[in-house]
Amino acid sequence: MSDSHKDLRALAAETLGTLLLVATVVGSGIMAQRLTSDTALALLGNTVPTGAILFVLITMLSPLSGAHFNPVVTLVMATNRAMAWRLAGLYILAQIVGGILGTALAHMMFELPVLTLGTQIRTGSAQWLAEGVATFGLLLTIFAGIRHKPAAIPALVGLYITAAYWFTASTSFANPAVTIARAFTTTFSGIRPEDVPLFILAQLAGGFAAFALARWFRFTEVSR
């Protein structure tokens, strides 16, 4: 297979994976909101499908693209020289486009307007700290998995995000592409567009802090 065909398949996998991830996050949030008025139960209904789909998507698409589905993961991998910067830029574009399409798909499945600007207020130092912590833990989990048990990464990531939904004040977006996509829904999982930039800044800070610690722990020394 030529490099161009390999890259095209990787980009398709990143688009599809992020699309299905966001469709699950937004769609399960809509379903939970329609089935119950109990916020804790609705959050549980949002959490379990998200952790489950991450396991499925990473297992299914990792051989094609590495299953990043997350610009922070892609940026850190490029910084670690695990991929070319040009390809990293295309990955990030694919992830953002896929995420927005995922929101649109979820809305269409539930007969809602295709895209609407979010109204859910998510701001303040506690939220930003939570996003930094959520992304820090996610990236450290990925690097530890690569170093010690690569076959377990789908389960590790799915379980980490399932837990982080509940121990972080922000419910663990931990992903700039997902954050942008969630700015196009007014439903349970939404976020106001004006709250997005600082969420993403916190995610980048947490991700690169995890990368620095992973290097000190020598988690990054395994060839990929």
Image (cartoon, grey):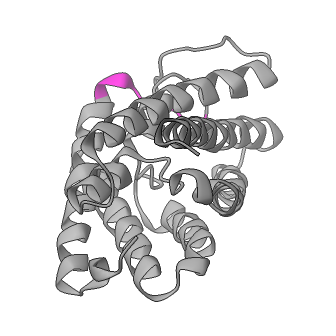
Name the residue located 38 percent from the left edge and 62 percent from the top edge. Answer: 134
Q: Main secondary structure of the magenta part?
A: loop
Image spot of residue 120 (x, y percent)? 46, 31
Name the residue located 40 percent from the left edge and 53 percent from the top edge. Answer: 174
Q: Is residue 143 left or right of residue 207?
A: right
Verify whether residue 191 appears in magenta. yes
Name the residue located 67 percent from the left edge and 11 percent from the top edge. Answer: 113
Verify whether residue 181 appears in magenta. no
Quick check: 86 above or below 209? above
Residue 88, image quadrant:
top left
Image spot of residue 29 (x, y percent)? 67, 41
Quick check: 176 above or below 82? above
Q: Is residue 186 left or right of residue 27?
A: left
Report the front residue among 82 and 108. 82
Magenta extent:
188-194
Q: How many marks?
A: 0
Q: Is residue 224 left or right of residue 63?
A: left
Image spot of residue 111 (x, y percent)? 79, 16
